Amino acid sequence: MPELMRRIWSEEEGQDIAEYAVMLAVILVLVVGTIRLIGTNSNTVFSTVASAVQ
């Protein structure tokens, strides 16, 4: 097991995987933030339309 960990940290390919993981995390944060913002705004619009219809 220690040999495997040493090999993972010393290989350059492992750094590529870490970079992809960081990029994926940033993209997920942006997507979740956008969905929350759109959800809040759409809820406001639907509430306004529902009030106008009544």
Image: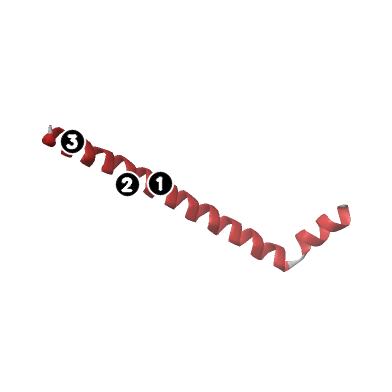
User: Which circle's residue, 1 or 2, is located before the other in the chain?
Assistant: 1
Mark 1 near mark 2, Cβ–Cβ under 8 Å? no
In the rendered structure, the answer to whether residue 30 lies left or right of residue 9 reads left
Could you say which is closer to the camera, residue 48 or residue 18?
48
Q: Position of residue 48 (x, y in %)?
A: 17, 37
Could you say which is closer to the camera, residue 23 or residue 39?
39
User: Which circle's residue, 3 or 2, is located before the other in the chain?
Assistant: 2
Task: Give the residue type at disc 2.
Answer: Ile
Residue 33 - label = 1
In the rendered structure, the answer to whether residue 52 lies left or right of residue 40 reads left
Task: Give the residue type at disc 1.
Answer: Gly
Residue 38 - label = 2
Q: CA distance from mark 1 to mark 2?
A: 9 Å
Instruction: Residue at 60%, 57% (x, y): give it.
Output: 21
Instruction: Residue at 22%, 40% (x, y): give it.
Output: 46
Give the vertical position of 18 relative to 40 (above or below).
below
Q: CA distance from mark 3 to mark 2?
A: 18 Å
Q: In this rendering, which labeled residue sits more in front, label 1 or label 3?
A: 3
Q: Position of residue 44 (x, y in %)?
A: 24, 38
Q: CA distance from mark 1 to mark 3?
A: 26 Å
Instruction: Residue at 76%, 66% (x, y): give it.
Output: 11
Q: Position of residue 27 (x, y in %)?
A: 48, 55
Q: According to the image, label 3 marks what residue?
A: 50
Could you say which is closer to the camera, residue 15 or residue 21?
21
- State the SS at label 2: helix
* Quadrant occupied by the C terminus: top left
Q: In this rendering, which labeled residue sits more in front, label 1 or label 2?
A: 2
